[in-house]
Amino acid sequence: MLLQSEIAGVGRRAMATVLDLVILFIGLSFVARGMVLSPVGMWLVDFVIAICYSGLLIGMRGQTLGMMALGVRVIPAGEGGLDYGQTFKRAAFKWLPIFGVFILLAVFIPDELRNRGMQQSMIEQVEINSDATMIPTSILLLGSVLWLFLLHNARRHPDGQAYHDRLSDTCVTKTM
């Protein structure tokens, strides 16, 4: 069990994740510029790249760029060092709740909104069936509840472990 002073707080970890998302989306905007994929395909590619980004960087250094900036590091919960099996499992379970919501939204977003041309003014009204927006709205609501539930559980765990840490047998500590 870690000392309370060693455990990285949920706020610091959440901000590192937000910073990693910003870094990923800036990088992905250049990578995906020439790709012609459906919205679902783009989110799936983004999800795979996020897993590779986190899995490789944490496997090599114990930190992603966002974690480095905010002074947190992933360590094994048990004896020994981190292996790539742990880091990729951790990355997949960490990013799934985030990208899963966006993938589901891309699947269920109404065609009226998806096919709206860029030449149309943002002020123009588009008639959308209110039943068609119920599923995406529900996905956003349930996704938000899931994210809050996961944050709450990480905060309540004695070692500050989130589900992805428990599944991969890792802990996140402060480095500064």
Image: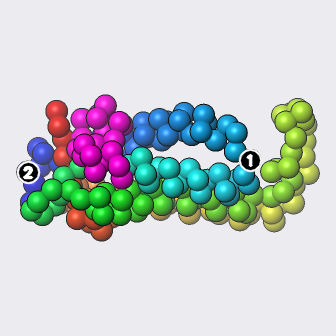
Q: Residue at x 80, y 51 (%)?
A: 114
Q: Is residue 164 visible?
A: no
- Find residue 2 and report its horizontal and vertical position in percent: 10, 54
Q: Residue at x 35, y 36 (%)?
A: 65
- Find residue 138 and report its horizontal and vertical position in percent: 65, 63
Label 2 crowd bin: few (<14), some (14–19), many (20+), radius 10 Å: few
Badge nearest the viewer, 2 or 1: 1
Q: Which residue is drawn at 28% across and 35% down?
A: 68
* Residue 3 numbered tag: 2
**Quarter containing the C terminus:** top left
Height in image: 52 above or below 156?
above
> Is 175 positioned to the left or the right of 143 in the image?
left
Mark 2: secondary structure: loop
Q: Which residue lies under the disc numbered 1?
A: 36
Tell me the kind of residue under disc 1.
Val
Question: Is 70 or 27 nearer to us in this picture?
Answer: 27
Label 1 crowd bin: few (<14), some (14–19), many (20+), radius 10 Å: few
- Find residue 147 and report its horizontal and vertical position in percent: 45, 57
Q: In which quarter of the image is residue 155?
A: bottom left
What's the magenta bit mostly, secondary-structure-wise?
helix
Q: Residue at x 33, y 45 (%)?
A: 57
Height in image: 25 above or below 56?
above
Return the disc, 2 or 1, that comes first in the chain's sequence. Answer: 2
Figure coloring = rainbow
Tell me the kind of residue under disc 2.
Leu
Q: Is residue 104 visible?
A: yes
Height in image: 35 above or below 2?
above
**What range is drawn magenta here?**
55-73
Question: Is 3 or 104 nearer to us in this picture?
Answer: 104
- Give the number of marks: 2
> Is 123 positioned to the left or the right of 62 in the image?
right
Q: Distance between the residues labelled 2 and 1?
A: 49 Å
